[in-house]
Amino acid sequence: MEQIDYEPLLPKAPPVDLVQWVLEQEFFQEEYLIYKAGRVYEPLEDRMRPAVEVVCTNCGNSFFAEKVDAGGCSAGYAPAPFGWYHHETSESVISGSLTLCPICGCEVKVMHVGSIPRGIEKGAWITMMSRLPVEGYKDRFVLTEWLVKRRIEKSGESRYTTYPYSAWVVEEKKVVRLMGYMKTIGGATSLFNKWEQRKTFNDVYGTVSICYPWDKSILEGTTAENCKLDLYQDAGGKRLVSYLALWRKRPTVENLLVQGCGRFLAELIDKEKSSGMDRGGIPKLSEVNWKEKRPAQMLGLNKEEFRHMRRMGWSAEDLERYRLVKKVGIRMKLPEDMELLKTRPAYDINLVLEEAPRADFWRTIRYLSRQKSDWRTLRDYRRMAAEDGRDLTDNLVCWPRNLAASHQRQIAEREAIRNRKEAEKRAREQAERKEKFRERLAVLEELSFQQDGLLIRPCADEDELRQEGKELHHCVGSYAKDHASGKTAILFIRKVEAPDKPFFTLEFDEKRQTVRQNRGLRNCDRTPEVAAFERAWLDWLKKGNPKLPRKKGVAA
């Protein structure tokens, strides 16, 4: 069948009372006190003085207030260049403050005109139900979404406009989507009072926020006559378009609604749409067997189970819990066992079924429920207990009276053992490094040199190295490991008159007999005095005075 063009058939404007109805729902509740710089006449001084002009968007009245510098309005940074003094509340307010209008007493938000360069806009999306006569065809049921926009100008005046936003027309076999025509120019979106028909269905806009009152008699004689949309909405369903698309493809879904499963169905649709895996379109609801027509069989339940489900008001997760247990053949007594299962999340029940002994299933669930804990905690506790050689055949070990405390005790004991081992390891490493420092000191002692009031000597130990870095504010302390292993050599340059006070730190390449770096306070470069001393020391080394170990192939 050729696709009907619904664009010219849909209404171009909503009911005339729509804006008034939206205001009665108190959707646009947020009001403002908009202020700007002004001047007021001071009769006693016969002059105009600076002031602040304020207008209330709720009552429309305006008044003048005393100007207050921004620094006196807020302890933090100033969101506006200035604020004003509120005489009724005896406080200074600034853009962003919440207060009361001194004229009408309405709770308002204070806004400086500079914070709203294009005014303040807020929108309400109103969903309406209607029937659409089409010549030669059955009347179409239409779900229309109108955008009501409130624009508050800098003057405080409010202006309301309505635009066609979305529409879905229910046909005999599918749902046709139309969009309010939008045009983007230079990054700004303009809305026009016309409809644009889309080729593919996609429930982009999710849930209904505000639904205009409607009577189910609208459905009679339309393409959605038996859809039971009123029952779905009465059960708290918000995804009306998703439901209509699902009903159009799977008409038997209405059986679930008739049998009192509306809340359950709404949860299933919400769960799929909110999962992040859904890309729009018709819900699949894999939990439902669409080959069946009777509600019990559609959910994989027998009559008795379905009766309990309706009477106890099972949720979508409750059904998942029940199915998990039933699937593995564990016997259940309704409704007692179901009430016990409700205390555990479905994923936790699944883990117990997969990892715990099947014979202990109900005992495990009751135990976790009493302990207000989960299977992962019990599993982790038992693993640590087994590794520590504890007897899990002992009931007090396997099922501790306080699982949380026992679990934390196991963790604390392991943490103490780990800390002790790490401390012993650090002590061994420190002792080994101390010995290596002594060996290095013996090797590098022959590099000691003194001239013109300065001296150079090797680092004695790790503590001295770290103290050098701390006092000179550089990173030589991190060279301890390389110095001890012989990868580099750290020597200290000191003044003869203060041999224990850090002055300059020198890194020496023993293999090439060159200076890698020589730094003073805060990594400063050599002074002329230190540079001359370094050259003299290197000349002394080249004359072969110290007997340094030389690697094969390196010239003296």
Image (tube, rainbow, N blue to C red):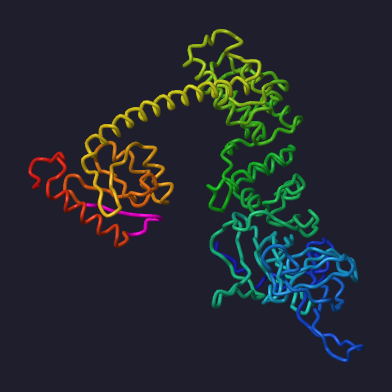
Q: Residue at x 84, y 76 (%)?
A: 65
| Residue 35: percent from left, percent from top | 77, 76
391 in magenta: no
Check the image and name the residue furthest to the bottom.
46
294 or 377: nearer the eye?
Answer: 377
Percent position of residue 11, x then y: 71, 71
Residue in front for this viewpoint, 402 or 173: 402
Relative to residue 538, is residue 416 drawn left or right?
right
Quadrant of residue 373 in the image? top right
* 291 relative to 131, above or below: above
Q: Residue at x 56, y 53 (%)?
A: 280
Above or below, 256 relative to 69: above
* Residue 286 coordinates in the image, percent (x, y): 56, 39
Residue 477 falls left or right of residue 278: left
At a point 36% along the width and 49% down the height, the residue shown is 497
Highlighted range, magenta = 515-525
* The quadrant where residue 553 appears: top left
Q: Position of residue 110 (x, y in %)?
A: 77, 69
In the displayed structure, would residue 299 be above or below residue 140?
above
Q: Quadrant of the N terminus?
A: bottom right
Q: Is residue 146 above or below residue 544?
A: below
